[in-house]
Image (cartoon, rainbow, N blue to C red):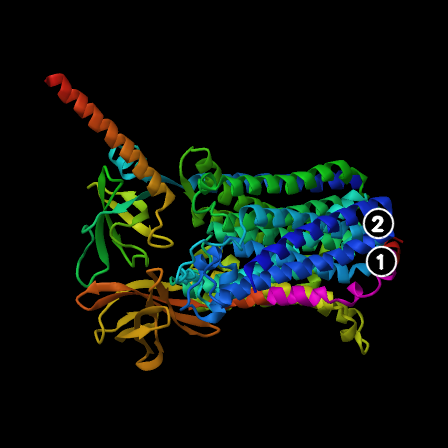
């Protein structure tokens, strides 16, 4: 396939995206059924052409077509073929194309489910999604075309960045993009609600599964990224508060707030403008994240100066999307219905607390991420904001989240009695107190007060996670009660359980992990540390298709008994002349033993970083549980019933509750 | 309390919470900012004492010394005008090399040596941390100015 075919398909996709947005938005405005229906078909066509463009680029990578500048810069004949596919999204141009494909995919999915929505509302949603496509296609075609040809193709390519040559990182960007781009759907729903000044909040119910799915992908993506950083960057950290990580964490925080605020909007018809605002913020931060990571602005804000077209387009696009959405919000938000009232001790209050904490956390991350960029762009000095800042802000906020998380699910809407709620949570309270007593006994209280509080609150969240389904069972003990517990309740409980598990892992590894840099000689003395004895047995040369290097074998013993032999590597990638550290890890649920090779120190000695990481697996296990919970909740039965019927049922419920 | 009063209490509580969090956050922010300085700025005494900062420059060729078999390493950083010695104990990053631009976190000791607790070198071998690139550019201008001043001074004697 010739690359020009891909370029042509992209141009076609742009034409169709324009048509999709015009037909959708104008069709809804004019009440023209034919236009609105056509915009759906056109959206499917846009997906088809985007897929063609993406396939052509992938084929160019697989076929080593170095006449394409982008392929020549990011691939090599020695690169194993799975990484040639991953290289498609290994840099700016290709990741934009992936972004567009994923957006077209989400749009197609919305189109396929559009019959559940009122005709005009669905048309507006599809129209808004089309507008976003138009922006990204213009950006790609005019500033970042992946199909640009080289007049004289090189014999071989410059290879993929070795850091990206890893299975987890190969699928990390697509997962993040599924999440980022998925937030375009609640964004489009929110704008459609604003445009139509919707009196009915049925859309809030319809958008919940979409939001949960987008959040699921983002959660898995971030978890995978953290795991990858742990074993591949070589130094055993699992979160660095690096701008690249923050870029994906901010939409996650706001997306989490959005999921909870949508619950209030759906069930109580309240928090509507706030929900709309969160939907706008989640997608805006997703856009910001995409651009921060891929535009080179993090390497240097002055990268914009070397390629002004890209920088100006990005800023203009961000300003248009965010500014446009906010202007629309300012005009229309007062026309949105106001919700019912509630007492200070009620589920609404706890969800409000959740939202305030998560939004403040996201704001703090935003400040720490963007402020250095602003100062640098204005030539006011070069600063960086270290992990101590983020930890100082984040730890107290998350402790509050953990403290409050047990109450949200078991309190009634509108009002409740706090004594009754505490009684419901008696068992988790007793268990968590017992747990912290045991934990302090085991560790002799090493770590201090904050660690003890953190452990206690994490255990509290874990034990209280399933209080809501248990409470439902207590109310009705007949046969089939278990079956009647809706999936959304299980999903929420599993996700909350996952958060507790992650929190426990974070506390344990931060407070009780051991880390030491040692100089080891092959066959030399063992180093005793962290309760283990570590001995460097020897080193051997290794060779891969595009790298060579050394592998150590490092024996770890406990009480004289050989536990494991770790095999950390130091690789040198030949084309890019870049060194990479591959850690040697012995993983168990309760602890990891971790070794990373430094460098030769002379006299045969090597520097080696040795680590013991208690419960580090809990961090990612919790992340996956959270994602699983989101996925289960997204498939709740009530999202599958026809929308009108299910909304009528909720309205009746609400009226019943008010009576 | 009426419903209205209750709502006001709730709003006030939220506002107080947010304001408190913002206050704590900004304080943490102020305390944890790390400023970047070039080696010339260190020599000119522009660096605050007793505060951690980031020092950047090029690792001078042949300056890396190691006590054999130990993790302690010494090297000299420069912005091409002013050299500053650095010590570090631990594992250097994969891309640390002589002639490479790097950034180190740490503070000055009494002997004019920068004691690093973290050394950063990133990306590929052609990569130059943007801060270091800027400091070298400034050092170049400074060097040209001094040369011109010197030339002018010598001209005056003749």
- Circle 2 packing at 10 Å, graded few (<14), some (14-19), many (20+), is few
The answer for which chain carries disc 1 is A
Q: In this view, does A611 lie to the left or right of A129?
A: left
Instruction: Give the residue at mark 2.
Output: A200
Is there a contact, CB below 8 Å, between mark 1 and mark 2?
Answer: yes
Q: Kindly identify the residue that appears in the image at 59 percent across and 58 percent down.
A: A6
Is any part of residue A312 visible from this angle? yes
- Residue A156, labelled with which disc? none
- Compared with A531, A24 (above or below) is above
Instruction: Give the residue at mark 1.
Output: A647
State which quadrant residue B78 falls in. Answer: top left
Q: Kindly identify the residue that appears in the image at 26 percent across and 35 percent down.
A: B40
Q: Which of pointers 1 and 2 lies earlier in the amino acid sequence? A: 2
**A111 inside magenta stretch:** no
Secondary element type, mark 2: loop
Q: Kindly identify the residue that appears in the image at 33 percent across and 54 percent down.
A: B125
Position in image of residue A400 (x %, y %): 58, 52
Label 1 to label 2: alpha-carbon separation: 10 Å
Q: Kindly identify the residue that appears in the image at 29 percent across and 59 percent down.
A: B91
- Compared with A64, A556 (above or below) is below
**A646 inside magenta stretch:** yes
Which residues are the magenta region?
A: A625-651
Q: Is residue A353 left or right of residue A89?
A: right
Position in image of residue B123 (x %, y %): 38, 54
Quadrant where the image shows the N terminus of chain A: bottom right
Position in image of residue B75 (x %, y %): 22, 50
Position in image of residue A200 (x %, y %): 84, 49
Tell which of B44 and A516 is nearer to you: B44
Q: In this view, does B132 lie to the left or right of A12?
A: left
Is any part of residue A271 visible from this angle? no
């Amino acid at each position: 396939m010739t690359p020009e075919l891909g370029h042509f398909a992209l141009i076609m996709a742009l034409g169709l995206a324009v048509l999709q947005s015009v037909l959708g938005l104008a069709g809804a405005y004019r009440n023209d059924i034919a236009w609105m229906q056509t915009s759906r078909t056109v959206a499917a066509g846009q997906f088809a052409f985007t897929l063609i463009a993406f396939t052509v680029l992938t084929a160019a990578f697989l076929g080593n077509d170095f006449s394409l500048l982008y392929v020549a810069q990011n691939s090599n004949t020695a690169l194993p073929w799975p990484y040639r596919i991953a290289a498609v999204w290994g840099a700016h141009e290709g990741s934009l194309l992936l972004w567009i494909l994923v957006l077209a995919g989400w749009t197609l999915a919305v189109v396929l489910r559009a019959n559940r929505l009122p005709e005009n509302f669905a048309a507006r949603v599809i129209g808004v999604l089309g507008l976003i496509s138009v922006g990204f296609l213009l950006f790609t075609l005019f500033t970042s075309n992946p199909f640009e040809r080289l007049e004289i193709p090189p014999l071989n390519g410059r290879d993929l960045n070795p850091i990206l040559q890893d299975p987890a990182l190969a699928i990390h960007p697509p997962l993040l993009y599924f999440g980022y781009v998925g937030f375009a759907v609640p964004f489009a729903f929110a704008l459609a609600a604003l445009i139509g000044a919707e009196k009915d909040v049925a859309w809030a119910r319809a958008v919940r599964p979409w939001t949960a799915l987008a959040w699921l992908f983002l959660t898995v993506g971030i978890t995978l990224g953290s795991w990858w950083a742990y074993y591949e960057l070589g130094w055993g950290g699992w979160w660095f508060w690096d701008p690249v990580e923050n870029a994906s964490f901010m939409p996650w925080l706001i997306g989490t707030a959005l999921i909870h605020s949508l619950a209030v909007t759906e069930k109580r018809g309240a928090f509507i403008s706030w929900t709309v605002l969160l939907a706008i913020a989640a997608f805006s931060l997703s856009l910001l994240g995409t651009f921060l990571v891929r535009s080179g602005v993090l390497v240097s804000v002055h990268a914009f100066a070397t390629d002004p077209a890209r920088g100006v387009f990005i800023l203009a696009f961000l300003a248009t999307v965010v500014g446009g959405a906010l202007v629309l919000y300012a005009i229309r938000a007062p026309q949105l219905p106001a919700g019912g009232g509630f007492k200070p001790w009620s589920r609404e209050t706890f969800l409000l607390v959740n939202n305030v904490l998560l939004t403040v956390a996201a704001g703090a991350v935003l400040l720490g991420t963007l402020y250095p960029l602003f100062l640098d762009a204005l030539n006011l000095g070069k600063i960086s904001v270290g992990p101590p800042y983020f930890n100082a802000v984040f730890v107290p906020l998350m402790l509050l989240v953990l403290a409050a998380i047990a109450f949200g699910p078991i309190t009634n809407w509108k009002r409740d009695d706090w004594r009754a709620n505490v009684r419901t949570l008696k068992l988790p309270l007793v268990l968590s107190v017992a747990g912290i007593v045991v934990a302090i006994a085991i560790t002799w209280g090493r770590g201090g007060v904050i660690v003890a509080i953190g452990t206690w609150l994490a255990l509290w969240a874990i034990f209280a996670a399933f209080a809501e389904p248990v409470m439902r069972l207590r109310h009705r003990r007949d046969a089939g009660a278990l079956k009647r517990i809706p999936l959304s309740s299980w999903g929420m409980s599993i996700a909350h359980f996952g958060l507790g598990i992650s929190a426990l892992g974070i506390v344990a590894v931060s407070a009780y992990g051991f880390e030491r840099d040692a100089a080891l000689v092959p066959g030399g003395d063992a180093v005793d540390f962290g309760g283990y004895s570590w001995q460097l047995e020897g080193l051997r040369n290794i060779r891969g298709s595009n790298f060579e290097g050394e592998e150590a074998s490092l024996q770890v013993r406990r009480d004289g008994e050989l536990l494991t032999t770790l095999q950390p590597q130091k690789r040198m990638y030949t084309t890019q002349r870049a060194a990479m550290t591959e850690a040697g890890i012995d993983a168990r649920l309760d602890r990891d033993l971790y070794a990373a090779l430094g460098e030769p120190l002379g006299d045969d000695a090597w520097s080696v970083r040795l680590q013991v990481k208690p419960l580090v697996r809990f961090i990612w296990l919790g992340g996956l549980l959270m994602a699983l919970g989101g996925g289960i909740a997204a498939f709740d039965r009530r999202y599958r019933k026809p929308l009108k019927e299910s909304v009528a049922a909720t309205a009746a419920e609400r009226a019943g509750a008010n009576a | 309390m009426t419903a209205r009063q209750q709502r006001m209490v709730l709003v006030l509580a939220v506002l107080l919470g947010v304001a408190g969090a913002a206050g704590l956050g900004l304080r943490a922010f102020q305390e944890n900012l790390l400023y970047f300085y070039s080696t010339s700025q260190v020599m000119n005494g522009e660096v605050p004492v007793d505060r951690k900062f980031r020092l950047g420059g090029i690792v001078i060729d042949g300056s890396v010394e190691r006590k054999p078999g130990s993790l302690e390493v010494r090297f000299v950083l420069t912005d091409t005008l002013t050299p500053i010695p650095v010590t570090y104990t631990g594992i250097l990053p994969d891309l640390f090399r002589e002639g490479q631009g790097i950034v180190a976190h740490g503070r000055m000791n009494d002997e004019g040596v920068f004691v690093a607790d973290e050394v950063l070198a990133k990306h590929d071998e052609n990569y130059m941390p943007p801060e270091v690139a800027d400091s070298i550019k400034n050092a170049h201008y400074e060097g040209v100015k001094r040369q011109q001043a010197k030339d002018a001074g010598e001209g005056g004697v003749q």
